[in-house]
Structures are given as structure tokens and as C-alpha cells.
Image: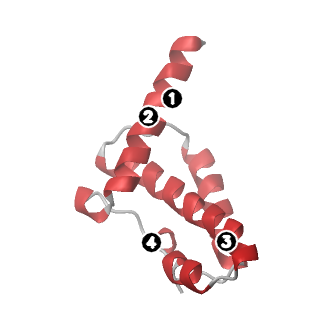
Amino acid sequence: MTTDQLLLSTAPENVQQVALARMAEKIVLAHRYLYYVLTQPIVTDRMYDTIEKNARKILETIGVDESPIFLCGSDLASSYSDEVKALAVSLRHQAELNKKAT
């Protein structure tokens, strides 16, 4: 089941969990886009592994077994949604601002 399918079949009291899962999924994909497509990662490999591991746990906990984060990353920009690309650019921008502030 995908996060979209789960969201459609979820009881109202569980919508927050599904929303968290979808955000975790998008964060992983945004980091993959930064790494594989833009070749501009903003986190270490170790931190990325932790982010992905936690996102997978969240998805598995609510019964999601079909997600791109269970597959290998892609270096094709067309593999990523516009929403994921926008999140990646936003994360990159925030990382740059954080660097300047330190």
C-alpha cells in the first residue's frame, strides 16, 4: 500500500500519522534529489542513512510497503515530483542560510 492509498482509507484519527509518513517520504526523496541529481548533498552519508532508516520505520509502522524510499535512488530528474524538487531546493537554501549564520 502506498501513502496515498493509505490516506484515502485512513480513519480521521490516524490522518496525522499518515501525514507524518508522507512528509518523511518526501524528505528522503528530496535528499536523494540533492545527492543524485544536483550532486549537492546537504547532509553527510551517515546522517542521510539515519533519516532514511527512520522514514522507513515510520512507513512500515503504519503499513506502507510501496514507497520509492524502499528502492534505490535515481539520478534522473524525471524520477522526482515537482513537490519533491521544490522541497529539495528549499532544504538547500535553508542549509546555505544556516552556513552563513555560523
Amino acid under disc 2: Arg
Mark 2 near mark 1, Cβ–Cβ under 8 Å? yes
Mark 3 near mark 1, Cβ–Cβ under 8 Å? no
Looking at the image, residue 81 lies above or below residue 96: below
Is 52 placed left or right of 35 in the picture? Answer: right
Mark 4 or mark 1, which is nearer the start of the sequence? 4
Q: Which residue is mark 1?
A: 95
Q: In terms of secondary structure, where does tag 1 sit? A: helix
Q: Which residue is mark 4?
A: 68
Q: Determine the residue positioned at 57% across, 50% down.
A: 48
Looking at the image, residue 87 lies above or below residue 12: above
Real-space CA distance between mark 2 and mark 1, rounded to the nearest whole angstrom: 5 Å
Amino acid under disc 4: Pro
Q: In terms of secondary structure, where does tag 2 sit? A: helix
Q: Which residue is mark 2?
A: 92
Real-space CA distance between mark 1 and mark 4, rounded to the nearest whole angstrom: 24 Å
Q: Which residue is mark 3?
A: 15
- Quarter occupied by the N terminus: bottom right
